[in-house]
Image: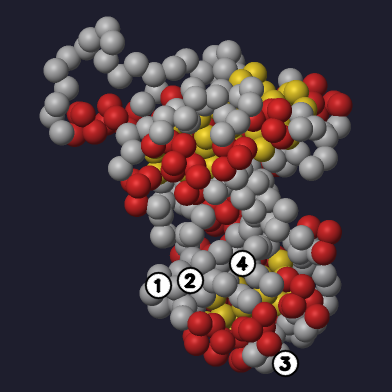
Amino acid sequence: MPASRLSVVVTRRLPEPVETRMTELFDVRLRETDDKMTREELAEAMATCDVLVPTITDQIDAGLIAKAGERLKLIASYGSGFDHIDVATARSRGILVSNTPGVVTEDTADMTLALILAVTRRIPEGLAAMQAGEWQGWAPTAFLGGRLGGRRLGILGMGRIGQAVARRARAFGMQVHYHNRRRLRPEIEAELEATYWDSLDQMIARMDVLTVNCPHTPSTFHLLNARRLKLLKPSAVVVNTSRGEVIDENALTRGLKAREIAGAGLDVYEHGTDVNPELRSLPNVVLLPHMGSATLEGRIEMGEKVIINIKTFADGHRPPDQVVPAML
């Protein structure tokens, strides 16, 4: 199928260089505004296009896939996550799914360290005092936070992003620990100076900072549940730049309110934009609007990966970033 004849529908506004290149290559329908497509709009697009380019805000479930037209053969998702797509149902309908892995690694790792620093050094509290005009000058006991050097960092999920976080943490003098489905190769462990814990419970109980860097799958849903959160030291900090569903948000909120957990830095939430309102008012919590991968460079690279996946598919080959069952 010639690439020039492919009908491509993009569900959200993308960076201008990406949209321009797609217009050059495909018969593309771009989004006029940056609001989410309704379910009806998604169904209409899937009924008429060859390739759908959704984002993580688009829930492509079995019901929508069942209504897809015979033309739809590729869902080229703009983003590294794919838990918003029913991949198994898509495969059963002969629809390939691709994503954009690896692009957001460095940007997300940067944001993870930023949140660790923000919480442990109480940066938002200082910023709020300055903006309110309340600062009365330096004082020996004002805004006392904690030093990162020497703290134990527990990384939950040691893939690309987890390893990038580990490298940054070592530069700050932190002791790196991790729990992962599979233990890293010895040479990678040695490079990162990372200690592996087979038992997540035992690791959690000993960490000063716990950062979530694993995907959302059925096996990781509420991996940090109420029981495990109670294992944390009262001085511990939790950071999540991965997927909100990995943490029981209500249980985390209760622990933070009771000061059973010292603080949290969150960029993702269990129910998307429906954030637990009690989290917003806690002084020991830093909340960001899912901006861990929000760099212009990263967004353009994501678009380039989408284009490569579509072009490779159009040329009759498997997209290089196809999501396969082993990844689910």
The residue carrying mark 4 is 84
Q: Is residue 22 shown left or right of residue 219?
A: left
The amino acid sitting under disc 1 is: Asp
Name the residue tied to disc 2. 12
Q: Residues within 10 Å of mark 4 (few under 14, many from 20)?
A: some
* Label 2 or label 1, whichever comes before in sequence order: 2
First in sequence: mark 3 vs mark 4: 3
| Residue depth check, mark 4 versus mark 2: number of the one nearer the observer | 4
Identify the mark nearer the N-term, 2 or 3.
2
On residue 70, which mark appears? 3
Q: Which residue is mark 1?
A: 35
Q: Nearer the viewer, residue 85 or 33?
A: 85
Q: CA distance from mark 2 to mark 1?
A: 7 Å
Amino acid found under the numbered disc labelled 3: Glu
Mark in front: 4 vs 1: 4
- Which quadrant: the C terminus? bottom right
Pointer 3: residues within 10 angstroms few (<14), some, or many (20+)? some
**Residue 172 locus on image (x, y percent):** 56, 19
Image quarter for residue 310? bottom right
* Residue 171 position within the rendered picture, expressed as x and y whole percent measured from the top left: 59, 20
Disc 2 marks which amino acid?
Arg
Q: Are dots 3 and 1 in contact, CB under 8 Å? A: no
Q: Give the crowd class for mark 2: few <14, some 14-19, many >=20 residues within 10 Å.
A: many
Type of amino acid at the residue the image marks with label 4: His
- Looking at the picture, does residue 166 appear above or below residue 274? above
Measured Cα–Cα span from mark 4 to mark 2: 15 Å
Tag 4, which secondary structure?
loop
